[in-house]
């Protein structure tokens, strides 16, 4: 019997995982370079404040790089990461918890250890539980 996999993670996961962090890192580097080039400029405090906020946003981008694509069916859950894909049984899932506003963590057992995968669910899933 052919099992149909249902996508649990959102369709915008690709943009959040690859495009948004690169954009914020480039913005941070641009602001840092502008601060060092124009260090005698009157607007330097403004650029320093902007660089600080860009740095804070870059820290918030760290979980985005760890996002996973998650698919499931009646017996298995497939976790697709950057390096490898993992197929776990649904009975090995320990719990699913909300993480940082709109992300979720999936805790599962693998080789006797509890591991986690971060994913971004569909927006209607988030709104339905609010």
Image: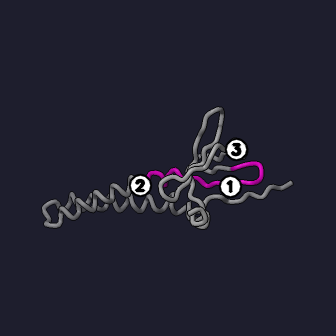
Residue wearing tag 1: 71
Q: Earlier in the sequence, mark 1 or mark 2?
A: 2
- Neighbor class of circle 1 (other Cα within 10 Å; few <14, some 14-19, many 20+) is some
Q: Is residue 69 left or right of residue 28?
A: right
Residue 4 point in image, percent of width and height: 77, 58
Q: Is residue 72 magenta?
A: yes
Q: Is residue 26 left or right of residue 68?
A: left
- Neighbor class of circle 3 (other Cα within 10 Å; few <14, some 14-19, many 20+) is some
The picture quadrant where one finds residue 2 is bottom right
Helix, strand or loop for disc 2: helix
Q: Residue pushed farthest top?
A: 112
Tell me the quadrant of the picture where the N terminus can be found.
bottom right
Q: CA distance from mark 3 to mark 1?
A: 11 Å
Is residue 82 visible to the viewer in this orientation of the structure?
no
Residue 104 point in image, percent of width and height: 56, 53
What's the residue at 67%, 59% (across, down)? Answer: 7
The magenta-colored residue range is: 62-77
Q: Are marks 1 and 2 in contact (CB under 8 Å)?
A: no
Helix, strand or loop for disc 3: strand
Residue 96 point in image, percent of width and height: 60, 49
Q: Earlier in the sequence, mark 3 or mark 2?
A: 2
Q: Is residue 73 left or right of residue 46?
A: right
The picture quadrant where one finds residue 72 is bottom right
Residue wearing tag 2: 60
What's the residue at 16%, 59% (across, down)? Answer: 39
Q: Nearer the viewer, residue 68 or 120?
A: 120
Q: CA distance from mark 1 to mark 2?
A: 25 Å
Q: Is residue 27 left or right of residue 127?
A: left
Residue wearing tag 3: 88
Q: Is residue 15 magenta?
A: no
Q: Earlier in the sequence, mark 3 or mark 1?
A: 1
């Amino acid at each position: 019997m052919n099992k149909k996999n249902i996508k649990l993670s959102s369709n915008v996961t690709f943009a959040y995982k690859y495009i948004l962090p690169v954009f914020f890192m480039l913005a941070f580097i641009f602001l840092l370079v502008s601060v060092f080039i124009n260090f005698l400029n009157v607007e330097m405090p403004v650029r320093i404040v902007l660089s600080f906020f860009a740095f804070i946003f870059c820290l918030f981008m760290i979980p985005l790089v760890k996002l996973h694509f998650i698919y499931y069916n009646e017996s298995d859950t497939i976790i697709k990461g950057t390096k490898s894909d993992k197929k776990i049984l649904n009975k090995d899932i320990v719990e699913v918890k909300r993480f940082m506003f709109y992300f979720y963590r999936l805790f599962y057992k693998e080789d006797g250890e509890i591991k986690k995968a971060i994913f971004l669910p569909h927006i209607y899933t988030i709104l339905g539980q609010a």
